[in-house]
Image: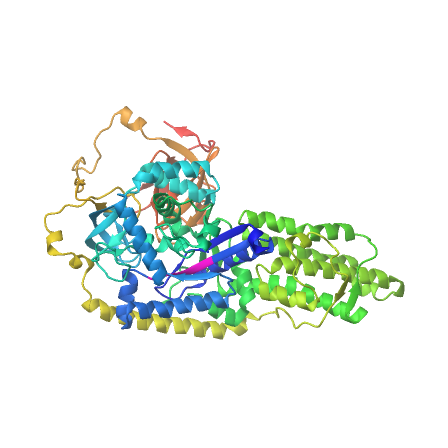
């Protein structure tokens, strides 16, 4: 009975309704769906929630540009998002919108509860504001004077706001993370959160805004609206009927705490620091696991409508079909590194994996059963040659797939299923059914071979139905079989008789050149849409007031703000009325006129730790034209280091070099990438740059001093 099943609650991040989601956004919904379907196959009572995040200044401005109300705007975009999720076959149980009346009522109650128990206080914050990211930054956090997250222009702004006292719960959260190593996955994300934020001390978090109106009003101060993260993150419990007054519904009692929050790596901080602290303040259990998956990147650079290179799920589906797109995004995304997508790559995988491996296997097997046995074969009576090894490989696939899925290695799980299909193709080559068919006394053996192939295909299709449900359904129907449970997939010989029916080609091979005109039409449409949108924005900007002008004059005069360190979290440029001003030197202090730095003592130099490190991997930082991300080996320790060398060295040139690094700098995050040190290089007046390398080969990790 359902009531006796073990529950499993999985969520995606809710999609922001600023525009149509591209394939990288859609990947998360498909990934969550594959996990949810597999858990159902394991026998769990699964609750799968997704939805849309619909408040904020960006939405308000986009609605103005479009000439509609914010609600009309988000209704349209939320409808588009839901259509794409449905198109991709996502089997969600709840699609929540943050404009749902029930969600808004509960968020207002939560805000009031936090205020009443002293977790929230009124202050103000100021700094350089990025409207698209809805984030404040210090000058030192900017990259080339622009937002370090999205690279867009920022403007000075100041605003009254309520803040949440994050430090009140920080030690408790650190203790929880240390006691539950599985809480943040992959481990690299956990290390980043601990080293970059928690262990450095948390800044209080802005949880209200006054410079726009499109949000949930603060119940006791209606010139404020609840700010994005307190509003958005609580969807995971409001969608279950949570009530802070103690009247939570049956779904909350049944499914909370969540088993898995599946999110993009760019919002890991909000889900592993802010969200757990909110839950602690509410006295609620924390989710069991947060997985920050990597990004799916465009093969020829960052996706941009103006370039016409954004890839959307519905465009891909029109050319390749739903299950082919699901296969690609699930199979091509590594566990903890970014994946790459392009039209050419999708077509290549379609032909090599889906047409050649899977489609060819199914069509050949059905054709031979029809040709040699009139459409049916019976359970194998004997065993010869590689039969035993083949059967063991097929029956062991379920356990291998489960092992990968338990570790959230979905791409590896799908690879295991296709390994089964590859092994079946090899089995055809080993047994040569066409040769057996020429000898009458080999007919029993031919029956057994084709039966074994049928069993392998039915098992493989049953495992595949979590990832490519429509394809699995077609295959199982063609073999007259029902989807097998995970347990049954571990037993070879479940079919009494395999009865096949003709099946059109599952994946007919694609000539990519024939698709190129359609792809160019898509790109041309995107460029035209981008030009029209840019024209609307230019017209809007002519009349739009600056953010800072929204603050009342009484708040602008005579109040000083605090500028925080570079390593502070985004949005942390803030102040409460009782704060003291932290003045920064305005350049030149302590520097001699000649440009030389002042003399230091040996004790000063001894504070710097210099070590030789070997660069074992290197890639460009996707949000910057100047930065490289190196993975550096220091003896038994590996570190992530970001350097501004992209204009001087390619990633390929960097790999394998042994270079001198400063290794005791405080870690910082640059363009979303953790940097745990600094590379040393020399540059002359002509701009020639050279890395500082040891004269002779020494072991990586060697200290300099």
Magenta stretch, overall SS: strand
* Residue 50 on the magenta segment: yes
Asked whether the viewer can see residue 337, the reply is no
Residue 633 image point, x, y percent: 46, 37
Q: What residue span does the magenta drawing correspond to?
A: 49-54
* In-front residue for pair 573/555: 555
Instruction: Say above or below: 409 vs 515.
Output: above
Quarter holding the N terminus? bottom right
Instruction: Say above or below: 506 vs 115.
Output: below
Please tell me how many numbered marks the rendered image carries.
0
Residue drawn at (31%, 26%) of the image: 606
Quarter holding the C terminus? top left
Residue drawn at (40%, 36%) of the image: 175
**Left or right: where does residue 510 sit relative to residue 423?**
left
Residue lying furthest front: 247
Residue 135 image point, x, y percent: 28, 53
Residue 586 image point, x, y percent: 17, 42
Q: Quadrant of residue 301?
A: bottom left
* In-front residue for pair 241/36: 241
**Left or right: where does residue 699 sit relative to residue 438?**
left
* Residue 524 on the magenta segment: no
**Left or right: where does residue 420 sit relative to residue 306?**
right
Instruction: Say above or below: 24 vs 170.
Output: below
How is this picture coloured?
rainbow
Q: Quadrant of residue 568?
A: top left
* In-front residue for pair 39/182: 39
Asked whether the viewer can see residue 554, the reply is yes
């Amino acid at each position: 009975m359902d009531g006796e099943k073990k529950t499993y609650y999985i969520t995606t991040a809710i999609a922001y309704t600023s525009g149509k989601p591209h394939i990288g956004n859609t990947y998360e919904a498909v990934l969550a769906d594959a996990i949810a379907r597999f858990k159902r196959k394991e026998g769990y009572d699964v609750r799968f929630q997704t939805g849309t995040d619909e408040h904020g200044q960006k939405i308000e401005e986009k609605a103005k540009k479009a000439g509609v109300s914010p609600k009309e705007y988000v209704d349209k975009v939320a409808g588009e998002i839901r259509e794409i999720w449905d198109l991709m076959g996502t089997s969600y149980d709840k699609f929540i919108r943050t404009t749902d009346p029930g969600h808004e009522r509960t968020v207002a109650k939560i805000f009031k509860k936090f205020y009443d128990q002293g977790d929230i206080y009124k202050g103000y914050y100021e700094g350089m504001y990025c409207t698209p990211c809805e984030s404040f930054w210090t000058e030192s956090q900017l990259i080339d004077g622009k937002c370090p997250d999205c690279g867009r222009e920022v403007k000075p702004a100041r605003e009254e706001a309520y803040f949440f006292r994050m430090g009140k719960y920080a030690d408790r959260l650190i203790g929880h993370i240390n006691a539950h190593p599985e809480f943040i996955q992959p481990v690299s994300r956990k290390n980043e959160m601990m080293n970059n934020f928690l262990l450095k001390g948390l800044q209080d978090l802005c949880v209200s805004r006054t410079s726009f109106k499109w949000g949930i009003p603060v119940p006791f101060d209606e010139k404020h609206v609840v700010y994005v993260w307190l509003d958005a993150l609580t969807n995971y419990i409001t969608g279950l009927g949570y009530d802070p007054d103690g009247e939570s519904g049956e779904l909350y009692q049944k499914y909370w705490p969540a088993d898995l929050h599946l999110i993009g790596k760019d919002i890991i901080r909000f889900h592993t620091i802010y969200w757990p602290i909110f839950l602690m303040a509410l006295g609620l259990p924390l989710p069991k696991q947060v997985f920050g998956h990597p990004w799916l990147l465009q093969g020829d650079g960052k996706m941009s409508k103006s370039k016409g290179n954004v890839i959307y799920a519905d465009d891909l589906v029109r050319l390749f079909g739903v299950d082919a797109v699901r296969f690609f995004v699930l199979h091509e995304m590594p566990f903890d590194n970014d994946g790459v997508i392009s039209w050419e790559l999708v077509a290549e995988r379609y032909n090599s994996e889906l047409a050649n491996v899977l489609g060819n296997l199914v069509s050949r097997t059905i054709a031979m059963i029809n040709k040699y046995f009139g459409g049916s074969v019976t359970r194998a009576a004997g065993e010869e040659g590689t039969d035993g090894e083949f059967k063991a490989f097929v029956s062991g696939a379920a356990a291998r797939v489960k092992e990968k899925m338990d570790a959230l290695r979905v791409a590896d799980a799908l690879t295991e299923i296709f390994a089964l299909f590859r092994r079946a193709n090899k089995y055809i080559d080993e047994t040569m059914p066409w040769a057996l068919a020429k000898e009458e006394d080999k007919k029993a053996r031919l029956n057994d071979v084709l039966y074994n192939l049928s069993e392998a295909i039915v098992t493989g299709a049953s495992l595949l139905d979590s990832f490519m449900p429509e394809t699995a359904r077609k295959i199982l129907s063609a073999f007259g079989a029902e989807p097998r449970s995970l347990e049954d997939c571990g037993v070879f010989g479940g079919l009494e008789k395999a009865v096949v029916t003709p099946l059109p080609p599952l994946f007919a091979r694609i000539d990519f050149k024939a698709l190129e005109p359609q792809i160019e039409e898509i790109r041309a449409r995107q460029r035209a849409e981008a030009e029209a949108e840019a024209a609307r924005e230019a017209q809007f900007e002519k009349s739009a007031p600056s953010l800072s002008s929204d603050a009342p004059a009484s708040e602008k005069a005579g109040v000083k703000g605090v500028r925080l360190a570079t390593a502070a979290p985004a949005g942390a440029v803030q102040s409460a009325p009782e704060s003291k001003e932290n003045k920064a030197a305005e350049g030149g202090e302590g520097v001699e006129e000649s440009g030389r730095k002042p003399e230091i003592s040996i004790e000063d130099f001894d504070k710097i730790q210099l070590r030789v490190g070997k660069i074992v991997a290197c890639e460009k930082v996707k949000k910057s034209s100047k930065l490289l991300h190196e993975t550096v080996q220091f003896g038994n320790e590996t570190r992530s280091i970001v350097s501004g060398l992209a204009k001087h060295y390619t990633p390929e040139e960097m790999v394998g070099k042994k270079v001198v690094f400063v290794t005791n700098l405080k870690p910082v995050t640059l363009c979303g990438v953790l940097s745990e040190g600094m590379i040393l290089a020399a540059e002359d007046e002509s701009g020639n740059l050279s890395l500082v390398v040891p004269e002779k080969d020494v072991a990586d990790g060697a200290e300099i001093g």
